[in-house]
Image (cartoon, helix red, strand yellow):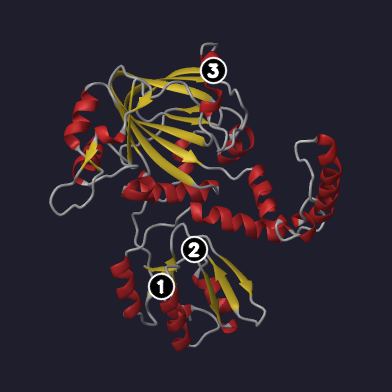
Amino acid sequence: MRAEYCEVAQGRDERSARRRCVAVEPSEFAEQIWGRRPLLSRPCDGFADLLDLDDVDELLSRRGLRTPFLRVASEGRLVPVDRFTGGGGAGAEVADQVLDERILDLYGNGATLVLQGLHRIWPPLIDFAVRLRADLGHPVQVNAYLTPAGNRGFAPHYDTHDVFVLQVDGRKHWTVHPPVLTDPLERQPWGGRAEEVAATAEGPAALDTLLTPGDALYLPRGWLHSARAVGEPSLHLTIGIKGVTRYSLVEALLDLAATEPALRAGLPVGVDVADPEQVAPHLAATVGALKDWLDRVEPAAVADALLRRHWPDSRPAPLRPVAQARAAAELSATSCVRLRPGLRWRTSGAPDGRVRVRTFDRTLTLPASCGQAVRAALAGDPVAVADLPGLDADDALVLVRRLLREGLLVPV
């Protein structure tokens, strides 16, 4: 008989994070909009539960922010950090804390405040980012932009990642132009095409709109944009999605190519690498060896290389270390646990028959007898220790205690 003493606390916001960002059905967004064109969604439920103006004041004045968690922009340019940071006073032995008096002066004179990395420091946005990453399958980051009335934060530019813009407070006029470079990679920022960007931004806009609270705007990477606060200060969130691309597959293949002896061979002594005629035969030989090797590459090896590169970009939900340690110490057969929210994991077999569990930052090796219980514990739903299959009570306690201490499970 299954234990009936495991209940999940009710009241958590389980709404799809993606549905708060786009008004169309998920399938339509994925197949017709993602990576292809901007999308304006209105109206939405509003976003003040994620961050509001009082929260911004809290972050700027009481949380001891340091760079790079804050940037300041004025007249389209970044303000040097030494103009708004300094020593934290007695007991805070750091020299780059945000100084609220200087922020007041800069903001009062029209500067835009950019709070960065909020998916790491502000609880509602930490939870939202974990859910959105689960919806999209790509790493997510969150910044907030507070712009005084009538001011523009940055000159027209493009991002090398897709974004959702969520208007929290005030109104902001957005102007969007087509890309000068389709699907730019992270190594292809707009600064290298500044003149082309400026010229394109002078032409007809693809979208010219006013965002009001509750509105959301999706922009694929590469689309030019600029925004200006209208009438009153404007606060919006920018959700950056660092998408895994086909070039990510190329990078993974390059990682694996280093294991192929034919592709590691050196060029002969005396070759002039600036002479196309001398390079040509070595290029042909390399391309031939590369083709032969590519025909033998296993998808599993590529997936493993992608895991190593991209899983660390998406941290799971935060742990409560003290509560976690207490739960492990007090664990009993009636204790309930569940997968740590947002944690990616994969199991595989070891040559000696044991089970390997891989996460974003570690690999655990467990006895073969634990395989069924591990998969049940990490399946996502709450489970009582006594209900784990394939283990007796003592072994189940040992397994769950380790998974708690390793941060794969959390107590319910």
Camera-side residue of 402 and 167: 402
Residue at x 41% of width, y 75% of height: 4
The residue that disc 3 covers is 195
The residue positioned farthest toward the left in the image shown: 90
Residue at x 28% of width, y 19% of height: 149
Query: For the residues carrying marks 2 and 3, which lies nearer the camera in this image?
Result: 3
Kindly indicate whether the residue at mark 2 contacts the one at mark 1 (C-beta within 8 angstroms).
no
Q: Is residue 217 above or below residue 308?
A: above
Q: Position of residue 41 (x, y in %)?
A: 47, 29
Q: Residues within 10 Å of mark 3 (few under 14, many from 20)?
A: few
What's the amino acid at mark 2? Asp
* Image quarter hosting the C terminus: bottom left
Q: Is residue 99 left or right of residue 228?
A: left
Q: Is residue 291 left or right of residue 86?
A: right
Q: Is residue 41 above or below residue 86?
A: above
Q: Is residue 302 above or below residue 20?
A: below
